[in-house]
């Protein structure tokens, strides 16, 4: 990488930070309990819209994993999500009617909040349908992982997005509030992921899985990215570039080993394919606020109409993180 | 007759206090040195929390214990002197840290040491032997000077080392001293420790070690050699280092492993490992069986972890392992031209070898998985577009998904040629080529038009380039190349040669022969192409009137070498 190029990336990072300052003005504080944040707390940041039914289980899950404080951005929910979140003792909430698309799909808002409240903390950025798992997550809280990453001098942690789907049609079984979504969606694709290296940002670009297979078989390039770096020891100078797929400075994207070894990595169990997607797909299509003209939602919409089944006889049933590690989807690295 | 503990603490003071209390209440005196970096308020609270114990003392002077520097040794010396002075009846002194945790009841340790009153437990390896340290210097620890901090003044540290290397400066060792290295955590007998601390030449040694790199791993280790009568070169503290020389941490889920290790003390423990602290800090004699320490299982666990980090799983490409060049996950066989020459070659091959046999995986229109499946192992799709989006990734993925079962597939010049370079460089690949055999397919269409001639020329060009590639010197695959004419001369021998390498049950005589395609008239077809100006040289010299006899497995005796 030339000096010029790294200087350009530096400028780009500054531009994103300025942009997040500007877009951050769209955020209106609803409940601010950030004074309660203690110095070593793990912070969870999330943007949401109409996810009320998912929230109780989501919060329970992450509380049990050791999250100290939640910082939510509510992008115009109409289903009472905001009221529910406002009642929780460990949550700070901002709301905005601003355009999701114009804030680069929420990234600008998140960058703003992270710079303000996340500096010096380990921060986890996930959507309400994503569940973070990592090696030994059944016996160790996330702090065990972050303490260990600290001792290794590692500032970021990779967790690839793993799409889970039900056995039958996507809308066959309704999701009930408080229920573990994994009771309904617990099947996944174990080995059809394609990886390439992005030389500019130094990250890996992962695609594949059920969405590529079922929705984008003829245009694989358009399939959603699955590489994610959701856990970062935040510094106010950092910036997410595109969702949580990559960051600047680009050293944070080096979460893989290029010489044969395996670095420690986790996964984000993606429980998007619940019956709630049906309504959401229609609404989001109308709003047109998603990436690349909401092509993903268009595909969902079309396939939901046809009753597409993602399951096939090679689908794997999710058991635990050890299974994913054996399948080679995540790795313990040298954390034992 | 008892043992005293010297504790060096710098973080997680509550845990350190908990352990100190355990030792003190079990009758062992404790002297604690807290790092100068610990804030005064925290230190005071820490002292107060142990204030009710009269056999717990604190070093008067708190030194800065930065990793790799003399401070740690200085603190140890001072605390040890205090310990020896205050407790004249001690037989051993045990050096521990604030993140150490006793695994066995204290009376067992006391009894163990009482049986070995003159033994010093200190790992001490001469630097002439196999390298002990992980990453970092061996000899140079002793021959160079290290006035700069590794962590805070890295630039000057590195430059100063470079400078000394360039000028070849070598420090003179104090006379009689043989440098030894070993774990920082030791348990020395009173006699040895006193001899070390009261050595008339100590000031000379101290001066020397002040500028040695990581002196806490060499000061006592070297000096004990001068005074000890009996050294057991091992540490009673279980402490494992990873590939970067950083200590491994123990968590709640290691409880059973730690219990079974029968070691006396382990480090380092994650401060929030509640279950470890609550279940191991006890003097209940029932939990152990008075055995010799045997950390073998833990060794293996950590060795495996380091191996995964450094080498990883061969053939796996994933989010945190993406090697620039790597082999595939397991052996596989590529057959080129065989399915044109033999009828139903795939099913015959599957039956004979017991391997998984696919058709043309790189067929431009769709992936021909075994049995014509739409999706395959790992949910790989048969979509040619998805495959061609990352053709090598498709192959490595398939081989990873099916590891444990040998995969065979057909390949030819009509297929997507992209993965050929990877396969040629992959030591797991077995590639067998019958050049020109694809022409049989053309011949069987029974057309000899301009179109066929063009197609033949195209395929021949592709195959020619492919064969050139396979003949490169750098290839690592097991490669066999015959022209069609050569192969036809002894097909069964050639097949046998390939299958001997594949067959699951070792070399076996072929009892069932595959059926050759009907080749009568193929010679004329080649001649016709030639007459039209297209020389199909890749097939070799196929005689014009040649019609090979049907194959018979018993006709040619096959000798096993």
Image (spheres, grey):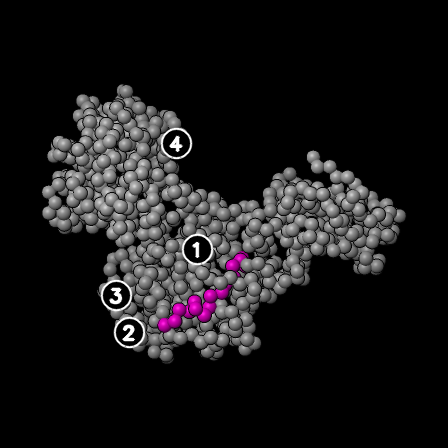
Q: What separation in Å lies between label 3 and label 2 (alpha carbons)?
A: 13 Å
From which residue to which does the magenta span run? A178-194
Question: Which residue, as the protein is rendered here, is positioned at the far right?
Answer: B545
Q: What separation in Å lies between label 2 and label 1 (alpha carbons)?
A: 36 Å
Magenta residue check for B424: no
- For this rendering, which residue is in front, A302 or B561? B561
Are the residues tagged 2 and 4 within 8 Å (C-beta)?
no
Q: Do marks 3 and 4 both belong to one polypeptide chain?
A: no
Q: Which residue is mark 3?
A: A34
Residue at (77, 39) in percent of width and height: B557
Check the image and report above or below for B461 versus A55. above
| Residue B488: % across, % down | 79, 45
Q: Which residue is mark 2?
A: A86
* Foreground disc of the pair 2, 4: 4
Q: Chain of mark 4?
A: B
| Residue B127: % across, % down | 36, 28
Q: Which residue is mark 1?
A: A322
Q: Chain of mark 2?
A: A
Of labels 3 and 2, earlier in sequence is 3
**Dividing the image into 4 quarters, which one contains the N terminus of chain B?**
top left
**Quadrant of the image occupied by residue A81:** bottom left
* Foreground disc of the pair 3, 4: 4
Check the image and report above or below for B73 versus A92. above
Residue at (52, 73) in percent of width and height: A169
Q: Do marks 3 and 2 both belong to one polypeptide chain?
A: yes
Q: Which residue is mark 4?
A: B131
Find numbered disc 3 in the image and state the secondary structure of the residue it sits on.
Answer: helix
């Amino acid at each position: 990488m030339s000096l010029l190029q790294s200087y350009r990336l530096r400028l780009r990072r500054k531009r994103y930070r300025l942009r997040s300052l500007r877009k951050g003005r769209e955020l209106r504080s609803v409940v601010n309990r950030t004074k309660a944040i203690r110095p070593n707390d793990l912070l969870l940041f999330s943007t949401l819209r109409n996810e009320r039914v998912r929230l109780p289980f989501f919060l329970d899950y992450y509380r049990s994993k050791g999250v100290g404080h939640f910082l939510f951005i509510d992008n115009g929910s109409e289903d009472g999500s905001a009221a529910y979140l406002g009642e929780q003792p460990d949550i700070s909430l901002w709301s905005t009617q601003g355009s999701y698309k114009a804030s680069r799909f929420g990234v600008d808002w998140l960058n703003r909040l992270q710079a303000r409240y996340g500096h010096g903390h380990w921060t986890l950025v996930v959507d309400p349908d994503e569940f973070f798992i990592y090696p030994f997550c059944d016996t160790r809280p996330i702090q065990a992982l972050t303490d260990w990453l600290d001792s290794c001098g590692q500032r970021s942690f990779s967790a690839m997005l793993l799409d889970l789907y039900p056995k039958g049609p996507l809308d066959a079984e309704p999701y009930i509030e408080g229920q573990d979504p994994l009771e309904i969606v617990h099947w996944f694709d174990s080995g059809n992921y394609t990886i390439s290296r992005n030389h500019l940002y130094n990250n890996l670009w992962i695609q594949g899985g059920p969405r590529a297979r079922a929705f984008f078989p003829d245009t694989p390039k358009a399939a959603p990215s699955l590489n994610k770096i959701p856990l970062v020891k935040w510094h106010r100078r950092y910036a997410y570039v595109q969702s949580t797929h990559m960051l600047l400075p680009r050293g944070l994207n080096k979460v893989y080993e290029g010489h044969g070894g395996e670095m420690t990595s986790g996964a984000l169990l993606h429980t998007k394919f619940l019956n709630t997607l049906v309504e959401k797909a229609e609404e989001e299509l109308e709003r047109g606020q998603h990436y690349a003209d909401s092509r993903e939602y268009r595909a969902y919409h079309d396939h939901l109409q046809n009753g597409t089944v993602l399951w096939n006889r090679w689908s794997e049933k999710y058991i635990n993180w050890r299974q994913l590690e054996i399948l080679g989807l995540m790795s313990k690295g040298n954390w034992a | 007759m008892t043992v005293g503990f010297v504790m060096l603490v710098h973080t997680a003071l509550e845990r350190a206090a908990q352990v100190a209390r355990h030792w003190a209440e079990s009758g062992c005196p404790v002297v604690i040195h807290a790092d100068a970096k610990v804030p005064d308020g925290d230190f005071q609270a820490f002292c107060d929390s142990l204030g009710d114990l009269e056999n717990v003392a604190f070093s008067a002077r708190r030194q800065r214990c930065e990793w790799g520097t003399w401070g740690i040794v200085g603190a140890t010396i001072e605390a040890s002197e205090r310990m020896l002075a205050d407790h004249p009846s001690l037989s051993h002194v045990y050096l521990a840290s604030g993140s150490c945790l006793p695994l066995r009841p204290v009376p067992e340790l006391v009894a163990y040491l009482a049986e070995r009153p003159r033994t010093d437990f200190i790992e001490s390896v001469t630097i002439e032997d196999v390298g002990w340290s992980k990453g970092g210097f061996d000899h140079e620890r002793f021959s160079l000077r290290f006035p700069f901090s590794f962590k805070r003044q890295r630039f000057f540290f590195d430059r100063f080392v470079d400078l000394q290397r360039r000028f070849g400066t070598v420090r003179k060792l104090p006379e009689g001293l043989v440098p030894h290295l070993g774990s920082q955590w030791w348990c020395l007998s009173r006699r040895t420790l006193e001899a070390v601390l009261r050595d008339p030449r100590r000031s000379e040694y101290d001066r020397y070690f002040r500028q040695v790199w990581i002196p806490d791993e060499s000061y006592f280790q070297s000096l004990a050699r001068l005074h000890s009568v009996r050294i057991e070169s091992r540490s009673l503290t279980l402490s494992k280092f990873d590939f970067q020389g950083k200590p491994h941490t123990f968590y709640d889920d290691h409880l059973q492993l730690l219990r079974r290790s029968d070691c006396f003390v382990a480090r380092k423990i994650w401060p929030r490992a509640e279950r470890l602290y609550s279940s191991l800090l006890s003097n209940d004699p029932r939990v152990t069986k008075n055995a010799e320490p045997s950390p073998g299982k833990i060794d293996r666990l950590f060795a495996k972890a380091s191996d995964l980090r450094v080498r990883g799983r061969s053939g796996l490409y994933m989010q945190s392992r993406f090697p620039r060049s790597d082999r595939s996950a397991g052996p596989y066989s590529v057959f080129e031209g065989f399915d044109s020459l033999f009828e139903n070659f795939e099913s015959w091959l599957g039956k004979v070898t017991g391997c998984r046999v696919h058709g043309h995986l790189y067929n431009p229109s769709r992936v021909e998985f075994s049995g014509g499946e739409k999706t395959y192992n790992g949910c790989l799709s048969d979509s040619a577009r998805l495959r061609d989006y990352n053709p090598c990734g498709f192959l490595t993925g398939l081989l990873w998904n099916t590891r444990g079962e040998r995969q065979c597939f057909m390949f030819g010049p009509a297929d997507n040629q992209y993965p050929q370079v990877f396969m040629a460089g992959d030591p797991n690949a077995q590639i067998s080529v019958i050049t020109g055999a694809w022409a049989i397919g053309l011949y069987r269409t029974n057309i000899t038009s301009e179109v066929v001639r063009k197609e033949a020329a195209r395929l021949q060009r592709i195959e020619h380039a492919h064969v050139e590639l396979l003949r490169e010197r750098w290839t690592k695959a097991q490669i066999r190349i015959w022209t069609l004419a050569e192969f036809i001369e002894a097909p069964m021998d050639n097949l046998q040669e390939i299958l001997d390498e594949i067959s699951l049950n070792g070399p076996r005589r072929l009892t069932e022969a595959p059926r050759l395609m009907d080749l009568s008239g193929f010679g004329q077809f080649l001649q016709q192409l030639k007459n039209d100006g297209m020389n199909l040289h890749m097939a070799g010299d196929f005689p014009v009137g040649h019609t090979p006899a049907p194959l018979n497995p018993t006709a040619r005796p096959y000798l096993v070498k």
